[in-house]
Amino acid sequence: MNKKNFFLLDIMKTGYHENYRDFINLNTLIGEEFNITQEYYDVSKKIQGYDRKLAILDTCLSTEQFLNNNKEYVTDFKKRIKNLKDIGFKFIIAHPWESKDNMKGKKFYEDYFKKESTLTWSGKYNYFWFLMYEKHKNNNYNFNHNDKKFDFLYLNKQSRPHRKKLFDVLQAKSLLDKSLISFLDAPYNIKLNSSYELPWVDANNYPRYGSDQEIFEPQFNDTAFNIVSETNDNNHDIFMTEKIWKPIIAQQIFIVHGNLLYLDKLRKMGFLTFNSIFDESYDLEENPDKRIEKIASLCVYLKNLDKQKIYKETQRIRQHNYNQFFNKAALSISINETVSSFLKFFDRG
C-alpha cells in the first residue's frame, strides 16, 4: 500500500512556494503519494489519513524581513507553528538557493521552533539544476563554437576569499589578458565588456538579484573555456549553482573552482567531465590553496591549445552533458534523493 504524504509548502506563503511545488512534483518515488498545498487554511480540511505531514518555512529575504520587523507576522507565525505541531507536522527550514556554509549565521529561524524537530534544506547539487531546467527547457539558443576570440569566460559577482585568491593568481600569471572577465565587488570593481553584457540589464549597474540565471550566447560563443567560480571551496557540502549549468547548456568546456570532489559528484549524477582530455586532478586536491595552483596550471595548458581541435575532441562529452541536463528523468532521479530525505526525516521521529 502506498504511503500518503502531505506537504504545506510555505507556512506563511511569503516565499517561493510555487518552486517548491514544482520541485517536489518532479519526484518519481515508487510507493509514495503526495498532496501538496500552499494554503495554510486548507490544512485542517485535508489532513486526515496521512502517514507523513511536513511544513516548509521559506527563509527568503521577504520572510526574514517580516520576522525581524512585523510583530503581527511573528505572532501569526508562532501560532501556526503550534497548530501544525499539535496535528502532527514536522518542519523543514528551506534555503535551497544557498549552501549550508552560507547559512551558518542565520540560525535565528530555528529559534522560532525551540526544541521542535526540524530539517534544514540547503541547495546541494540539484535545486539549481531544477531551476535552470525549468527556465531554459523551452528556449532555443544559437551556440557556435567555431571561432574563439577569447581564452576564458570568468564571471564573478560577490567577493569571497577563495574567489579573490584564484583571481589574483590568474592575474599574476597573465592568464586573463585575453579573456572576458568580471568581478563586480571591491576591491576589483571590474565590469564585463558592455557588448557581452546581458542586453536587458544596465551594463554599468549589474543587479544583485534576478539575472544570474539568464544566458546570452555571445559570452559563450566567443570564449573557449568557462572558469566556474562556485559559491564555496570547502571539502564538504557540495553545492552546485547556475554557474555550472550555464556552460553545460551552452556546450562549453568548463573548469570548476569549487568543493572537493565537485566533478566526481557531477559524474555520479550522470554527467561527463573532461578527465579523458586534460588533467582534472585539481578535483581531488584537499588543500584549497593547492587546488587553486592546480587550476592555474591547467589554465596555462588550456590557454595554449588549439581551440578548434579541443572542441572537436570534446564534442561527444559536451553533447552528452547537454542531453543529460535536459533529461527530465535524470533530474527526477536526483530530486528523488532530496524528497526521500524529507520523508526519512519524518520517519526518524
Image (cartoon, rainbow, N blue to C red):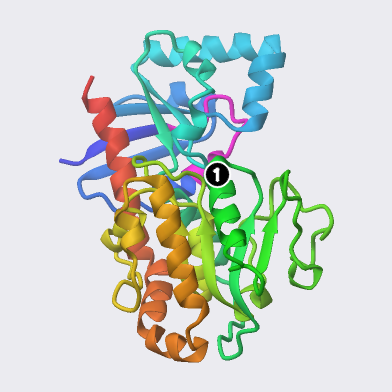
Q: Is residue 118 above or below residue 139?
A: above
Mark 1 packing: few (<14 Cα in 10 Å), some, or many (20+)? few
Residue 235 x/y as whole percent: 34, 42
Task: Tell whether position 14 is magenta.
Answer: yes
Q: Position of residue 36 (x, y in %)?
A: 43, 38
- Regarding residue 133, the answer to whether it shows in the image is no
Magenta residues span 8-20
Instruction: Using the rendered view, name the quadrant where residue 328 is placed.
Output: bottom left
Q: Is residue 277 left or right of residue 185?
A: left
Residue 143: image location, x then y, percent: 58, 82
Q: Is residue 1 left or right of residue 4?
A: left
Is 207 located above or below residue 322 in the figure? above
Q: Secondary structure at mark 1?
A: helix
Q: Nearer the viewer, residue 4 or 152?
A: 152
Q: Residue at x 68, y 11 (%)?
A: 72
Q: Which residue is mark 1?
A: 18
Residue positioned 34% across, 57% down in the render: 283
- Left or right of 13, for residue 55: left
| Pick the front one: 226 or 64 | 226
Horizontal and vertical percent for residue 296? 48, 62
Q: Is residue 339 visible?
A: yes
Quadrant position of the N terminus in the picture: top left
- What secondary structure do most residues of the magenta stretch adopt? loop
Image-quadrant location for residue 185: top right
The C terminus, quarter of image = top left
Q: Is residue 311 left or right of residue 165?
A: left
Give the residue displayed 44% in from the left and 66% down from the top: 297
